């Protein structure tokens, strides 16, 4: 059964996982080393993320769409300059959680959020938080690339323009810097005045990444950024993610397990609005600690 | 949910078992060739080695194909990765059997050197270690795998003891030197086979637990040491 058919979005009556499904994969007692590099081997994860301080903190997060609870007591940390993948079947809450990080759920009526989400020292859901300022710190890239029907240049400059930046030098610099960062500069530098809609799908997605980067966010939120792209465009974005984590912290929702394995330092597996397991990506994919994670990543789910 | 991949993994396991079965047959014949002084059985060992080599090539390719085409994760990944490591151990065991059988062809026509029961025991214990390592793989039996690893110590001490006996025999009787030196090679091969059974058992524990148990002295201390 493909994950997409597993359950509808925001199941009103989430069934509790079978107790044995949440049991450790094996009865063998073994140390909890999911967060530590493995002994006797070369750690695959960039060692700096192991000691990096947390940038995003999520504590006891519950989210309700009306009466329906979509997230149950989520506790998760995202470390600075790391890539965190959120995986799980459709409707598991991973996109909902991503949208909590820039308060995009505010745009949907009837949403209630309990718990704490912090970026650095700041509580995202504290009363009086300026949501616009907050969203500047959290750039977002969506599944379907959505360039504005404007020129390539204006697409990237858009965020700065609505902030009131008028200085052409600053705009030029930001557009060039962002397009270089998103790996698109060489392909478009001679046609910045052309419409962004004339680019290929992969280029459009990199244009959207450039647009998100232009306002110098701290975090890049990516919601299945490659699901509409061919393998070549996908690998360009994946390489880009690797480059971008030097300057940004990245949270990516993906249905592609190989992609999660390739791009992320940490992975979190969600099911029915609950965080089932999280840890170093290489540990989670070689030796998950919960049976349900094992079943999901190896395609046995359902 | 049933996966087509599970059938492929089952086939892989069956092929590995077929290879292990051939190797066990070689081990039995090797022991009998020595104990019964049977040239026919010694020759049969060499003949069987070709089949083991062929299975090695087949299994290597199967593992690479499954890694490339199925991109396995978690226990699937560990099974395939460990199979890639168990296969050469089995192949080497086959080679060691061939070495012992070759020495037995030389020793069989010569007068018997009285070793008491120790040489038979060395062969039997080693054979049992390989058998149980393979059984542990089949049944996913961690306790059995750990027992195999522990038994390696007893094979090692048997090896040291027989070696000492042979030195004593050579010192007492120079005419025994030729036979004893062949037997030292035989001993060494049995001892290596026991090591390889240990390696297989270690892979079985990795498949089951996902944590390498090799070289305990390099492993970090437990995270929550119990209070004294």
Image (cartoon, coloured by chain):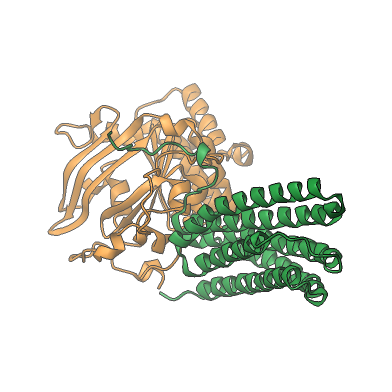
The residue at the far front in this view is B172
**Count of residue discs:** 0
A107 versus A169 height, above or below: below
Q: Colour of chain A?
A: orange
Residue nearest the viewer, comparing A105 with A248: A248
- Residue at the location (24% across, 62% down)? A10
Task: Tell me: residue A190, above or below residue B177.
Answer: above
* Position in image of residue A134 (x %, y %): 28, 33
Q: Nearer the viewer, residue B113 or A165?
A: B113
- The percent coordinates of residue A188 (x first, y second) are 60, 40
B207, above or below B134, in the image: above
Which chain does green denote in the image? B
Examine the image and state in which quarter residue A159 appears. top left
Q: Is residue A258 visible?
A: no
Image quarter (top left, top right, bottom left or bottom right) of the N terminus of chain B: bottom left
User: Could you tell me which residue is drawn at 28 percent across and 36 percent down?
Assistant: A57
Left or right: residue A249 compared with residue B121: left
* Viewer-nearest residue: B122 or A231: B122
| Residue A257 left/right relative to B54 | left
Q: Residue at 54% of width from left, 66% of height from top?
A: B132
Q: Residue at 74% across / 73% down in the picture?
A: B36
Q: Residue A10, relative to residue A170: is it above or below?
A: below
């Amino acid at each position: 059964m493909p994950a997409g058919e597993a359950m509808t979005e925001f199941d009103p009556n989430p069934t509790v996982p079978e107790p044995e499904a949440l049991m450790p994969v094996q009865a063998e007692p073994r140390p909890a080393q999911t967060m530590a590099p493995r002994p006797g081997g070369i750690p695959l994860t960039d060692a700096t993320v192991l000691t990096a301080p947390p940038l995003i903190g999520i504590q006891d997060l519950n989210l309700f769409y009306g009466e329906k609870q979509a997230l149950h007591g989520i506790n998760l940390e995202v470390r600075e300059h790391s890539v965190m993948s959120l995986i799980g079947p459709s409707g598991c809450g991973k996109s909902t959680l991503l949208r909590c990080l820039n308060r995009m759920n505010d745009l949907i009526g009837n949403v209630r959020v309990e718990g704490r989400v912090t970026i650095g020292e700041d509580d995202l859901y504290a009363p009086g938080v300026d949501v616009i300022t907050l969203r500047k710190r959290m750039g977002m890239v969506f599944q379907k690339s959505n360039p504005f029907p404007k020129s390539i240049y204006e697409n990237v400059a858009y965020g700065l323009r609505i902030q009131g930046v008028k200085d052409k030098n600053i705009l030029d610099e930001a557009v060039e810097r962002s397009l270089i960062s998103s790996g698109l500069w060489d392909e478009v530098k001679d046609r910045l005045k052309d419409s962004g809609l004339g680019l290929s799908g992969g280029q459009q997605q990199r244009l959207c990444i450039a647009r998100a980067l232009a306002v110098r966010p701290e975090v890049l939120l990516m919601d299945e950024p490659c699901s509409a792209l061919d393998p070549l465009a996908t690998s360009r974005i994946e390489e880009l993610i690797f480059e971008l984590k030097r300057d940004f912290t990245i949270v990516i929702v993906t249905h592609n397990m190989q992609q999660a394995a390739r791009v992320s330092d940490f992975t979190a597996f969600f099911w029915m609005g609950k965080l089932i397991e999280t840890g170093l990506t290489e540990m989670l994919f070689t030796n998950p600690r919960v049976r349900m994670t094992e079943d999901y990543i190896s395609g046995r789910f359902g | 949910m049933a996966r087509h991949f599970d059938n492929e993994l089952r086939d892989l396991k069956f092929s590995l078992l077929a290879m292990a079965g051939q190797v066990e047959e070689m081990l039995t014949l090797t022991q009998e060739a020595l104990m019964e002084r049977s040239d026919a059985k010694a020759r049969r060992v060499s003949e069987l080695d070709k089949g083991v080599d062929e299975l090695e090539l087949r299994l290597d390719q199967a593992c690479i194909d499954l890694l490339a085409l199925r991109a396995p994760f978690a226990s699937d990944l560990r099974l395939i990765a460990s199979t890639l490591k168990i296969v050469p151990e089995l192949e080497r065991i086959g080679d060691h059997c061939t070495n012992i059988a070759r020495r037995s062809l030389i020793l069989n026509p010569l007068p018997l050197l009285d070793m008491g029961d120790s040489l038979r025991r060395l062969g039997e214990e080693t054979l049992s270690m390989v058998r149980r390592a393979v059984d542990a793989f089949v049944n996913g039996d961690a306790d059995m795998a750990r027992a195999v690893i522990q038994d390696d110590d007893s094979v090692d001490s048997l090896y040291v003891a027989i070696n000492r006996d042979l030195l004593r025999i050579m010192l007492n009787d120079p005419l025994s030197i030729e036979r004893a030196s062949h037997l030292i090679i035989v001993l060494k091969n049995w001892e290596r086979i026991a090591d390889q059974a240990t390696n297989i058992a270690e892979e079985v524990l990795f498949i089951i637990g996902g944590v390498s148990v090799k070289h305990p002295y390099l492993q970090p201390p437990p995270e929550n040491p119990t209070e004294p």
